[in-house]
Image (cartoon, rainbow, N blue to C red):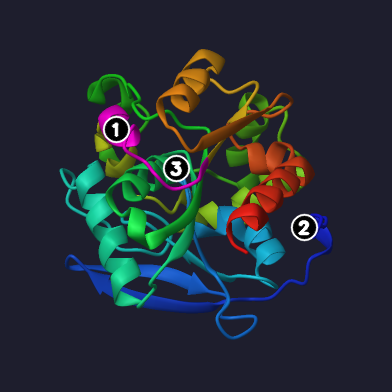
Amino acid sequence: MPATDASTAAAVEPKHETVTINGLNLHYVDYREPSPGATVMVLLHGLTSAWGAWRRVAEHFAPRYRVVALDQRGHGDSQWAPADEYDTDSYLSDLEQFVDGLGLERVVLVGQSMGGHHTIAYTARHAERVIAAIANDIPPSLDMGARAERAKAYPGGKHRLWASVEEWLAPRREQSPLTPEWAHALAARELLREVDGGYEPKHDPNAPIHWQPADLWDEARTITRPIFFIRGGRSTVLDAQTLQDMVMAIAPARSVTLEKAGHQTYWDMEHEWLTIADAFLQAHTR
């Protein structure tokens, strides 16, 4: 089935649920089965994001898949974790228990950035549970820089208070000029909350300050399930040489670069992203 424009997809509101994992209340949404036995798709958002960043992708796939999207610890409407528990293994433990707790025997995993990092790790560690995976614009290892430098964006360990949504959007538009206006509006809707005096992001400031992704190169080389790496041609996170190295090192891997996209490829080139994701998944979920 060719991809349809997500802007015309039926705006179906999923069921909102909460599950307790590793002592944290984690929020997720479930679009439910469109038909008995439908393949389950688990969506994992990026750092400082939330499930809602995937909303249009979820609506696109919901007529054919049971789409489940998790707010990972410290993000969206999920509970914040202790500052030192935003490491790869803690996130992976959440994902493992989430999949087990929902009784999901086999899944399609789709992850953006940090969620793609967790997709790589889970696919390597649990091949028997993964039908196919898509990791969006993330290498197996990533230098996040010094923690002290990252902390400067959060004076006193707190969010900056934005007077208005437009004030929050202005630097995002400047930093991501390829991103369409509908996506900026979606980000404001899904990633901000109104507080006394203005607006602030919904994520825990400690998540971006303390996240130091593990080096997954050795694990990635053991992947046996179909995995598709999608890179933005203007990305500053995943360069072309590293992508080539990934495909050479991981036997079942395939890749594509969307040249006119930045880090958020599924926003910047939505139609193209949906088309290639559809084609890859149809080839491996029949």
Magenta residues, start to end: 216-227
Question: In the image, residue 19 lies at what x, y percent?
Answer: 31, 75
Q: Which residue is mark 3?
A: 116
Mark 1–mark 3 CB contact (< 8 Å): no
* Disc 1 element: loop
Residue 198 visible here: no
Q: Residues within 10 Å of mark 1 (few under 14, many from 20)?
A: some
Compared across the picture, whether 279 is left or right of 160 comes to right
Three-letter amino acid code of the residue under disc 3: Gly
Task: Find the distance from the CA under tag 2 to the CA under tag 1.
Answer: 33 Å
Viewer-side label of 1, 3: 1
Looking at the image, residue 266 lies above or below residue 16: above
Q: Which residue is mark 2?
A: 6
The part of the image, by quadrant, that contains residue 268 is top right
Q: Is residue 223 magenta?
A: yes
Considering every residue shown, the one lying at the far bottom of the view is 36
Question: In the image, residue 155 lies at what x, y percent?
Answer: 31, 32
Viewer-side label of 3, 2: 3
Name the residue: 25% across, 73% down: 20
Q: Which residue is mark 1?
A: 216
Three-letter amino acid code of the residue under disc 2: Ala
Question: In the image, residue 186 lies at what x, y percent?
Answer: 66, 53
Looking at the image, residue 159 lies above or below residue 145: below
Q: Is residue 192 magenta?
A: no
Task: Find the distance from the CA under tag 3 to the CA under tag 2.
Answer: 21 Å
Q: Which is more N-terminal, label 3 or label 1?
A: 3
Q: Quadrant of the C terminus?
A: bottom right
Three-letter amino acid code of the residue under disc 1: Leu
